[in-house]
Amino acid sequence: MFEENNRNYFGSAQGADAGVIAKTFMSQVFTWMTLAMIITAGTAWWFGSSDSLMTYLKTETGGLTGLGWFVTLAPIGFVLLMSFGFQKLSALSMSLLFIAFSVLMGMSLSFILQVYTQSSIVQTFFVTAGMFGIMAVAGYTTKTDLTKFGSILFMGLIGIILASLINFIMHSGTLDYIISILGVLIFTGLTAYDVQKLKRIGAGAGEFGEENARKMSIFGALTLYLDFINLFLFLLRFLGNRK
């Protein structure tokens, strides 16, 4: 009864090949991710290249305005809302939240255009895209189970978050360098792990119903989006040339 009532664009759980279902699911994940990246990049460039718009985010002394603090902290709230509200939110609500999150991230990332040269930002973006693409393909095609590897990376992620909080007080250049190296390694590995995890989820997407499948594709896009953005920001510490 469940399968008969939940046929969707992925096909039924019994009648469709799991590989085809996974490919369809992953194509939607990457479509949503690409859309979010375009929105973020466009918003960041729009604000970062306009001194008048940046006055809404920064004070004359270089501090953050109320809106500046909001766009810096609000994305965390959006991620938590989409994570903990997954069951209650509709697919439409998830998509709107993801788009709003992409805009806020763009406004937040506009600050880097004030710090780094455009050429080094573009260069770092393409390096990030190359690394992300290689690891995404590796995660999708490998036969090795990356579950234990993912658990280790997650613990490492918790570690660099705690280390970053400590270094916020200590201001240690050496610790910052170590955090940056670990950040690149962790998010490079998480890219492969998350793609494999999403591929497995996608293989069973036909059983979940159209609404849940859509929500999972959006949340999957959010996961990969965060992997890409964090990898980009950590690489920018090494490759970025300050103005």
Image: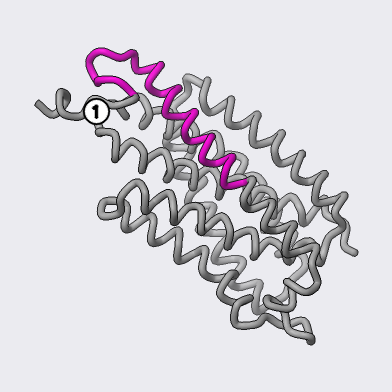
Indicate whether residue 182 is drawn in magenta: no
Q: Could you tell me residue 144's position as x and y percent?
A: 47, 23
Q: What's the residue at 30%, 14% (across, down)?
A: 16
Q: What residue appears at the point 87 percent right and 57 percent down from the top-left corner?
A: 117
Q: Position of residue 70 (x, y in %)?
A: 56, 74
Check if residue 36 falls in the magenta segment: yes
Decide: is 14 above or below 135: above
164 versus 140 height, above or below? below
Residue beneath disc 1: 207
Task: Write down the region rendered in magenta.
Answer: 10-37
Which element type, helix, strand or loop, lies under badge 1? helix
Q: Nearer the viewer, residue 145 or 66?
A: 66
Q: Check the picture and name the quadrant holding the C terminus.
A: bottom right
Q: Residue at x 44, y 27 (%)?
A: 145
Q: Quadrant of the N terminus?
A: top left
Q: Is residue 159 left or right of residue 175?
A: left
Residue 4, picture quadrant = top left
User: In the rendered view, would you say 40 is above or below 78?
Assistant: above
